[in-house]
Amino acid sequence: MTAAAFDRVSKVYKTGPFARGGVPAVRDVTLAVPRGSVFALLGPNRAGKTTLVKLLLSLARPSAGSVTRLGEPIATRHTLGRVGYMHENHAFPRYLSAGEVLAFYGGLSGVPTDELPNRVSAMLERVGLADRRHEPISRFSKGMVQRLGLAQALVNEPDLLILDEPTEGLDLLGRQLLREVVREFKKSGRTVLLVSHVLGEVQELCDEAAVLVGGGVAFRGTLADLTAGRTDLETALRKLYTKEAA
């Protein structure tokens, strides 16, 4: 069983007058993310990583091919309540408090009303923001907003956690917290999809990876396979990016 699957997926963003033009973002991508894995999605900027995430979250529709989320087509919206998503740049309303943000997102993702207060308290405690529960986000530092973003992604106790550059702005303790969360997911048989340029983080946490270059899949396999015969992950990726771009 897969947590996410892309079957010959292409996406073209329409542009120009009357949408006659188009910018291809991904092309003929076939990729499966196994359940219970910590899976890295790698690639240079504009390789198509964000587009795949948008498709998985039903924020965009494929131009061709099909996408499944937790075993069901992405048109089946109820599975979104089993997904947690942490973006690198959060756009939380800054006049809201941390507790209000989590209560809103918890309700939006289907957390039962009677469970919500305890869930919010537990998540704020988990990310070290319990003492800032009633404080407006406008007073938060970048790192505190990132911690709140992690709590928001976890508040519905998801089966699939998508982390998009999650360590941006986090301090040492925040990064340690994130690693602990990822390991907990793996231990419990749940799935993490990690989009990151921080290669040390990828090597420490991930089992498998897919590398996108130019909108297509240039590699899919274990990190050991990716680095076989090469000095390190950075060198392997650099050569792969250069080869595929040539």
Image: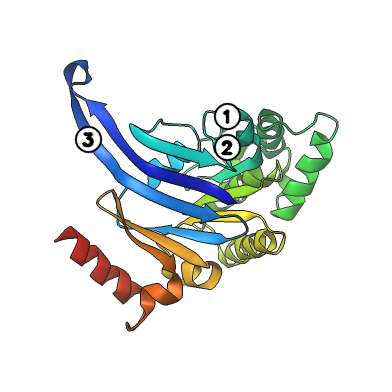
Apparent side of residue 121 relative to residue 55 in the rendered image (left or right): right
**Residue at image coords 64%, 30%:** 78
Residue extending farthest to the left is: 246
Residue drawn where x is 31% and y is 74% of the image: 236
Q: Position of 84 compared to 126: left or right?
A: left
Confirm or deny contact between disc 2 and disc 1 (CB under 8 A): yes
Which amino acid lies under the numbered mark 3 shown in the image of this protein? Val
> Would residue 4 be visible to someone looking at this image?
yes
Q: Is residue 35 above or below residue 96?
A: below
Kindly identify which residue carries mark 2. Answer: 72
Q: Inspect the image, locate mark 2, and give the three-letter code of the amino acid beneath it.
A: Glu
Q: Amino acid at mark 1?
A: Thr
Residue, far top: 18
Counting from the top left corner in percent of width and height, residue 6 is at 43, 45
Instruction: Judge the density around disc 1: few (<14), some (14-19), many (≥20) Cα neighbours within 10 Å.
Output: few
From the image, tell me which residue sits under label 3.
23
- Residue 182 at what x, y percent from top left? 62, 61
Quadrant (top left, top right, bottom left, bottom right) of the C terminus: bottom left
